[in-house]
């Protein structure tokens, strides 16, 4: 007589709940902070149609790339620039199914009604003319944050970098730069157009000339996911019309992914 009649059932439950089994239906995504709002909605729609849990982690692309290189469990990476994806490949990380997914624009924003309704960078007065003597310009840190790197390129191209470099309020990612403007800690900041669209607390003064900086391109790639069908399914779905329509509604340029 079996003295432990529930042992087979318990064993089956343990197997079903083991991390290895759960991992097949759970995908961790490392994504640039500027994707937060749009990707959250993309994930919500995807999960209603698939029995797969998507766990996003948002931060600066530089931070995420370094975490992945150090062994973070992300199975998919969406970077806010191509350089950090290139860096991962140079570090020997197994990057798969890499393709450009989205593009963006760089915007000068403000939360103050005292500033002009429109101010196009590079078209007349310098950005410094919007600021008081003790004011700073909020940006992503140009030393590593993609939005800050694009900002430095744009300011150099417009001949304003030397005048503004010492007056930058440097955020750890683009959303941190946005928050400084939202809270009124800086009169103006430089973020992506999509970040400005996502925040009711700021307004776009003007866009930087597209040719003043490298193209703002978001490559997406699987990370060591040869045996992860769930990650592959989500990666493919990101290029579907349903997903791209959501990204477009948040202000992203999806033309690089459209046929």
Image: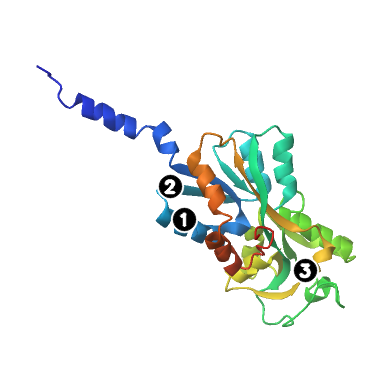
Q: What residue lies at 64% left-to-right and 34% top-to-bottom?
A: 94
Label disc, if present, on residue 46 of the rendered structure:
1
Work out how far the residue at label 3 is from the one at label 1, CA to CA, in angstroms: 47 Å
* Picture mark count: 3
Along the horizontal axis of the image, is 120 left or right of 7? Answer: right
Which residue is rendered at x = 83% and y = 58% of the image? Answer: 153
Whether the residues at callouts 2 and 1 have beta carbons within 8 Å, the answer is yes
Q: Position of residue 143 (x, y in %)?
A: 77, 49
Q: Residues within 10 Å of mark 3 (few under 14, many from 20)?
A: few
Label 2 vs 1, first from the N-terminus: 1
Q: Position of residue 112 (x, y in %)?
A: 67, 78
In the drawing, does residue 90 fall left or right of residue 101?
Answer: right
Helix, strand or loop under label 1: helix
Which residue position is annotated with label 3? 134
Of discs 3 and 1, which sits in the foreground? Answer: 1
Task: Please tell me which of labels 3 and 1 falls first in the chain.
Answer: 1
Helix, strand or loop at label 3? It is loop
Question: Which label number is shown at residue 52?
Answer: 2
Question: Who is closer to the viewer here, 157 or 28?
Answer: 28
């Amino acid at each position: 007589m079996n003295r432990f009649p529930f042992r087979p059932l318990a064993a089956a439950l343990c197997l079903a709940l083991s991390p290895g089994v759960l991992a097949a239906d759970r995908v961790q995504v490392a994504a640039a902070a500027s994707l937060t709002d749009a990707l959250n909605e993309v994930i919500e729609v995807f999960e209603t149609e698939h029995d797969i849990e998507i766990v996003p982690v948002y931060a600066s692309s530089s931070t995420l790339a370094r975490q992945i290189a150090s062994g973070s469990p992300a199975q998919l990476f969406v970077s806010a620039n191509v350089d950090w994806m290139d860096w991962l490949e140079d570090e020997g990380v197994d990057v798969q199914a890499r393709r450009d997914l989205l593009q963006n624009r760089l915007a000068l924003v403000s939360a103050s009604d005292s500033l002009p309704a429109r101010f196009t960078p590079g078209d007349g007065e310098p950005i410094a003319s919007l600021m008081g003597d003790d004011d700073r310009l909020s940006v992503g840190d140009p030393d590593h944050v993609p939005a800050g790197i694009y900002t430095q390129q744009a300011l150099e191209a417009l001949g304003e970098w030397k005048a503004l470099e010492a007056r930058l309020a440097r955020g750890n990612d683009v959303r941190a730069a946005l928050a400084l403007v939202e809270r009124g800690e800086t009169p103006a900041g430089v973020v992506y157009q999509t970040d400005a669209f996502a925040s009711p607390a700021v307004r776009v003064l003007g866009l930087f000339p597209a040719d003043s900086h490298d193209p703002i391109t978001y490559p997406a790639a699987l990370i060591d996911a040869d045996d992860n069908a769930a990650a592959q399914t989500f990666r493919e779905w990101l290029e579907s019309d349903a997903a791209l329509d959501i990204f477009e509604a948040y202000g992203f340029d999806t033309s690089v992914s459209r046929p």
